[in-house]
Image (spheres, coloured by chain):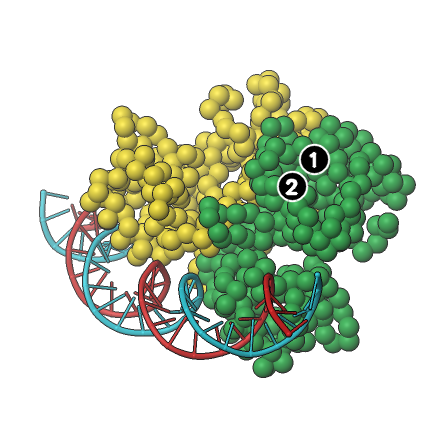
Chain colours: A yellow, B green, C red, D cyan
Amino acid sequence: MKTAGFNESDFFLDISTTQLDQIIRQGKVRELKSGAVLFHQGDPATQSFVVLEGRLKLCILHELGKEIVVRYIGPGELAAMVAVLEGQNYPASAEAVGLTRVVGFERRTMLKIIADHPPVALNMIRNALNRLEEMQNRYLEIYAEQVEQRIARSLLRIMKQAGKRSGDEILIDFPITRQELADYTGTTLYTVSRTLSAWQKKGWVKSKRGRIIIANPHALVLFTENF
Amino acid sequence: MKTAGFNESDFFLDISTTQLDQIIRQGKVRELKSGAVLFHQGDPATQSFVVLEGRLKLCILHELGKEIVVRYIGPGELAAMVAVLEGQNYPASAEAVGLTRVVGFERRTMLKIIADHPPVALNMIRNALNRLEEMQNRYLEIYAEQVEQRIARSLLRIMKQAGKRSGDEILIDFPITRQELADYTGTTLYTVSRTLSAWQKKGWVKSKRGRIIIANPHALVLFTENF
DNA sequence: CGACGCATTGACAGGGCTCAATTTAAGTGG
DNA sequence: CCACTTAAATTGAGCCCTGTCAATGCGTCG
């Protein structure tokens, strides 16, 4: 495992490779099959997790039915920061998207890591603040913008987190259904379907079942800014 | 200034009164008139602030017009945590609601405070996570619930942050207009007005210009859960 | 008292959710 | 390899919530 490729919300930012090995050795590595649930919303938060490979989907539920996807957590990112605090519950559920490897750390291990590695606490604050800012923006968007604009933004956001270039096109490299994109955007699968169909006709996206390719990212960006 | 009355998102949690004095002396106290803007969204974040008296309103703007109220910051709470991180901008604007006194801390002062007082870093993480969770829930609500339900929730949330009992009734003890409540809820001032009128007829609330009294909190709670 | 900002109320239209019916694609097992 | 099953996606029709716009009323302050 390398530090290369991690992004600004990385748990291991400013941590050397050897320190990193030390840290990981303090936790317990687990492998999850696609769809496996790592923890449930509302359960007492005992462990934090860092994703090594694959991807976690964080969701929260509303009484009866509706759910939203809060975020996808990729390699190097931390899930369930709450576990460092005593007596809290997980505010969201985490489910593996595709085969996923994670390291789990107990609360006291996390506290020890924070104490041993000063940058880690700052990383956690930075990370929490980034997510807070992102949620605030999504909140503003869901209020101020039309659905189609928000779907475009969602696609771009997911693309940034999990996009894979191939030529001019960008493939979202994990299976994502209309329903999930709807849950992430705050709309219904019907509207997402209609919208993607329209964009497909314009040549902006291509989609097979469960796979989405963004054929013209530029057009999408323009669409979010403009009109 | 006393520690009493502060809540769980308090910056000074687990800090003794004498330590607290030491900390405050490291910052610069400022007094703001009602409506004064402490910092603007997008400006480079140089200082964090703790509210001593009064209240700050945190807003973010969408291109042209629409704005949302992210949160009200009361005594003992921290605003602009981002300032501890290098090279970030304020993600929101802060405006004083009523006469407000704050202490401002430069980045390096904040870093020193964190280093000198270990609980502070954890408090900041706790605080950021609480706000993140709150935003996530608001995001879910704006998607899943009808406006009236959300208005009820907003009132209850604001009541929790700034409510003042008098008998069975609860007064929100700072001036809040229909427009602001709408910005906080993610709706329009018209809908808020209509809704409050209806509730006034039912005896759930009383409202004078700029003041809101919740006459029957219980009914509102039932309304948010049930319906 | 005049003027300005806040609040109320009505009429109207439209975005997008809901529901129902099909079509398409992907597995599965014989 | 094909029939069968099941999940995902598409598409159409209708309607309701709530945002928009306009007109009016009311409180407060200079």
B157 in relation to B218, above or below? above
The residue lying furthest to the right in this view is B18
Residue B64 percent across, percent down from the top left: 46, 48
Q: Which mark is residue A146?
A: none
Q: Nearer the viewer, residue A144 or D12?
A: A144
The answer to whether residue B191 of the structure is visible from this angle is yes
Residue B185, image x and y in percent? 54, 60
Decide which of tag 2 and tag 1 comes sooner along the chain.
2
User: Residue A43, can we see it?
Assistant: no
A150 to B104, vertically: above or below? below
Please report the residue visible at 72 percent of the width from the left and 41 percent of the height from the top: B49
- Where residue B40 sits: x, y (%)? 61, 41
Q: Is residue B192 above or below residue A220?
A: below
Mark 2 chain: B
Q: Indicate which disc residue B47 carries.
A: 1
Q: Secondary structure at mark 1?
A: strand
Instruction: Identify the amino acid type marked 1.
Output: Gln
- Which of the pair C10/B126 is nearer the observer? C10
- The chain under label 1 reads B
Point out residue B41 in the picture as x, y percentages from the top left corner: 58, 41
Q: Residue at x 71, y 30 (%)?
A: B107
Labels 2 and 1 touching (C-beta < 8 A): yes
Q: What residue does disc 2 label?
A: B39
Side of B149 where B126 appears, left or right? right
Q: Residues within 10 Å of mark 2 (few under 14, many from 20)?
A: some
The reply to the same-chain question for discs 2 and 1 is yes
A128 to the left or right of A59: right
* Tag 2: amino acid: Phe
Residue under the point 60% across and 38% down: B90
> Mark 2 falls on what kind of element?
strand
